[in-house]
Image (cartoon, helix red, strand yellow):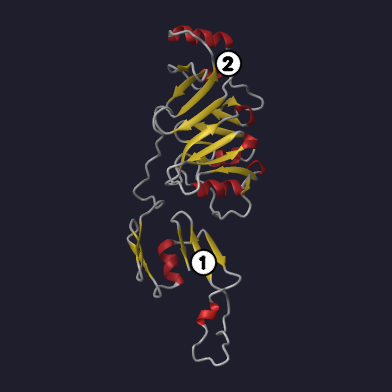
Amino acid sequence: IASLKGYPGYETAMESEGAKAMADARGETMEVLPGKALGPFMLGCPLSKVISYMKHWGMQYRQVQVQFSQGDLSTDICLVAATIGLRLRFCGYSQRLKLIDVYDPKKIQISYEGRLLSGPKSTPTFSLVSRVLGPTFPGKCHPKREVYMLQYPGVCALFPFKSTLEKHDQVVERLEQIDPVAVRFFLHTGKSCLERLQLPSLGASELYFELVVVRIGTGIRFAKRKRSLLFRRHTLQHVLSVLGKPDQVYVKDIDSMRIHRASSNSADGKLPPTTRGDYFLNYFQLGVSLD
């Protein structure tokens, strides 16, 4: 279990579909936006922003399990908030949110267009889900997994179901009789969660995951904004004008390299006077730290 306390974050909160989604996520109801979001968690949102949000709001986010494969970028990264039964799955390469998994619906209260779908006081039965999400789309049985998948564009519900019936009409009739309770909800981009998971496309003006070109000994260039920073030439003011406010400023308490900057003409070996230690400007969404 990894605590989010102290994790480098952002001062700005996550974008959402409105102020209501931000308020709901802090303790009551999260609104389902099929193919887009659950409460404040937007599909396509960077991992760093989600962690920043969890760090900023609510006791339910104080401890989150981080699942990842070290050194393997092809493996997804997951944040698991067990207290609310929520798993957020991120692309390992771009670190953008690609699947929202409500794996324990009784722990988290979610709604669609203002109507409760699940939660501690609302049981997500087959009949309720079909009624709230609208006309039922053709579902699909998975006999080996003993589940029935009710798929809508951008959202999917899983129900425990064991049957040897083959005709869909018979399956639906049986489901209406037993009225099983959903054990899982998925929110995703695309028509079906069985297809390869997609990420929402980035807009032309979106600077996240921007190509950074490194010119050894010279500087770095940011492709989308068409601006460069030159080593030992550009000042702090220039950096801020190009990249804006950093996500975090880290000041080194102990500068282990100071001894190498001692004057070669100094007979007594005294270090040159300094008024403050070195510091880094961290831009997490760019993957860049400037010293």
| The label number, if any, that marks residue 156 in the structure image | none
Q: Can residue 17 be seen in this view?
A: no
* Picture layout, residue 260 above or below residue 17: below
Mark 2 surroundings: few (<14), some (14-19) or many (≥20) residues within 10 A: some
Where residue 27 appears, x then y in whole percent? 64, 38
Q: Residue at x 53, y 69 (%)?
A: 279
Q: Which amino acid does label 2 sit on?
A: Pro
Q: Residue at x 66, y 25 (%)?
A: 121
* Picture layout, residue 150 above or below residue 80: above
Where residue 270 appears, x then y in whole percent? 58, 87
Where residue 193 appears, x then y in whole percent? 44, 29
Position of residue 216 in the picture relative to residue 83 (left or right): left
* Picture layout, residue 220 above or below residue 194: below
Q: Which residue is drawn at 53% across and 52% down?
A: 12
User: Label 2 belongs to which residue?
Assistant: 180
* Residues at discs 2 and 1 in contact (Cβ within 8 Å): no
Q: Distance between the residues labelled 2 and 1?
A: 55 Å
Mark 1 surroundings: few (<14), some (14-19) or many (≥20) residues within 10 A: some
Q: Which amino acid does label 1 sit on?
A: Phe
Give the camera-side residue of 103 and 132: 103
User: Label 1 belongs to which residue?
Assistant: 280
Position of residue 225 in the picture relative to residue 126 (left or right): left
Give the camera-side residue of 70 and 131: 70
| Quadrant in the picture for residue 140 | top left
Q: Can residue 241 be seen in this view?
A: yes
Where disc 1 sits, the SS reads: strand
Where disc 2 sits, the SS reads: loop
* Picture layout, residue 253 above or below residue 71: below
First of labels 2, 1 by sequence position: 2
Position of residue 242 in the picture relative to residue 10 (left or right): left
